[in-house]
Image: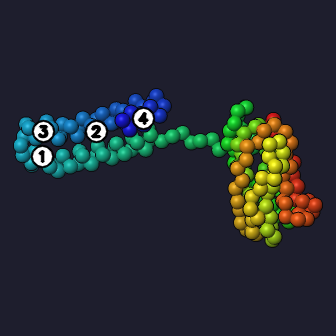
């Protein structure tokens, strides 16, 4: 049953390749387990070294086929600029904080699509900072305070509208730790 589910999850070309190698491997196992011992009770007997070598080669081919044909295509790393049109998608991008500045990726200066975003916040400053987001349906969602050299992730769903990203530690926003983001 697992093999059927695995095959169903693969693309057509990969299904065929994996199926062919699997059938050869299964056929070899069945023949060497049921047919050959009935025909030759001393199986593998004098031909043991050839049988063992064939077993190892087929096993290596099966593992190789799973690695080649069973590998999923690399997921496209979602970035602020690389989101597909419309719908909820998940994008992860890095936000760097230093004293009195929040630096968003240059691509995020453009209008983003609605979706789920993971902000990976890196504190490259000498003081503790956090990232707080306010906007439509998002009110003071924030990371914990991040020590110097530390990082934290903040997952948030952004709808259409304007968002304010800032450090909510008293006085930091007023010193310039404030950024704007448009969605939709």
> Do the residues under discs 3 and 1 have CB atoms within 8 angstroms?
yes
Counting labels gives 4
SS assignment at label 2: helix
> Which residue is the site of mark 3?
36
Instruction: Say what secondary structure mark 3 lies in.
Output: helix
Q: Do the residues labelled 4 and 3 touch (CB within 8 Å)?
A: no
Query: How many C-alpha atoms fall within 10 Å of the one at disc 4: few (<14), some, or many (≥20)?
Result: few
Q: Residues within 10 Å of mark 3 (few under 14, many from 20)?
A: some
Q: Of marks 4 and 2, which one's residue comes earlier in the chain?
A: 4
Quick one: 164 or 52, which is closer to the camera?
164
- Distance of label 4 from label 3 (alpha carbons): 31 Å
Secondary structure of the residue carrying numbered label 4: helix
Q: How far apart are marks 3 and 2 (CA)?
A: 15 Å
Considering only order in the chain, which callout, 1 or 3, is on the residue closer to the N terminus?
3
Q: In this view, does 39 lie above or below 120?
A: above
Q: Can residue 64 be seen in this view?
A: yes
In the current view of this chain or complex, which residue is farthest to the bottom? 126
Q: In which quarter of the image is residue 157?
A: top right
User: Taking 155 as reference, is 71 above or below it?
Assistant: above
The numbered disc on residue 44 is 1
- The colour scheme applied to this rendered structure is rainbow
**Residue 160: % across, % down:** 81, 37
Label 2 crowd bin: few (<14), some (14–19), many (20+), radius 10 Å: some
Residue 88: x and y in percent read 69, 36
Mark 2 — residue?
A: 25
Q: How far apart are marks 4 and 2 (CA)?
A: 18 Å
Q: Write down the residue under mark 4.
A: 5
> Residue 21 got which mark?
none
Q: Which quadrant, please, contains the C terminus? A: top right
Considering only order in the chain, which callout, 3 or 4, is on the residue closer to the N terminus?
Answer: 4
């Amino acid at each position: 049953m697992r093999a059927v589910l695995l095959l169903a999850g693969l693309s057509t070309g990969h299904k065929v390749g994996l199926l062919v190698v699997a059938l050869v491997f299964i056929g070899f196992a069945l023949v060497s387990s049921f047919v050959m011992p009935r025909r030759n009770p001393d199986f593998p007997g004098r031909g043991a070294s050839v049988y063992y070598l064939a077993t190892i080669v087929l096993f290596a081919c099966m593992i190789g086929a799973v690695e080649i044909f069973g590998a999923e295509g690399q997921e496209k790393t979602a970035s602020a600029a690389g989101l597909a049109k419309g719908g909820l998608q998940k994008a992860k991008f890095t936000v760097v904080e230093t004293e009195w500045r929040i630096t968003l990726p240059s691509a995020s200066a453009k209008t983003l699509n609605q979706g789920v975003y993971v902000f990976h916040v890196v504190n490259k400053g000498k003081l503790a900072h956090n990232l707080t987001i306010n906007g439509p349906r998002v009110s003071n969602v924030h990371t914990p305070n991040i020590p110097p050299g530390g990082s934290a992730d903040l997952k948030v769903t952004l709808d259409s509208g304007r968002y304010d990203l800032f450090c909510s530690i008293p006085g930091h926003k007023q010193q310039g730790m404030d950024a704007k983001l448009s969605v939709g």
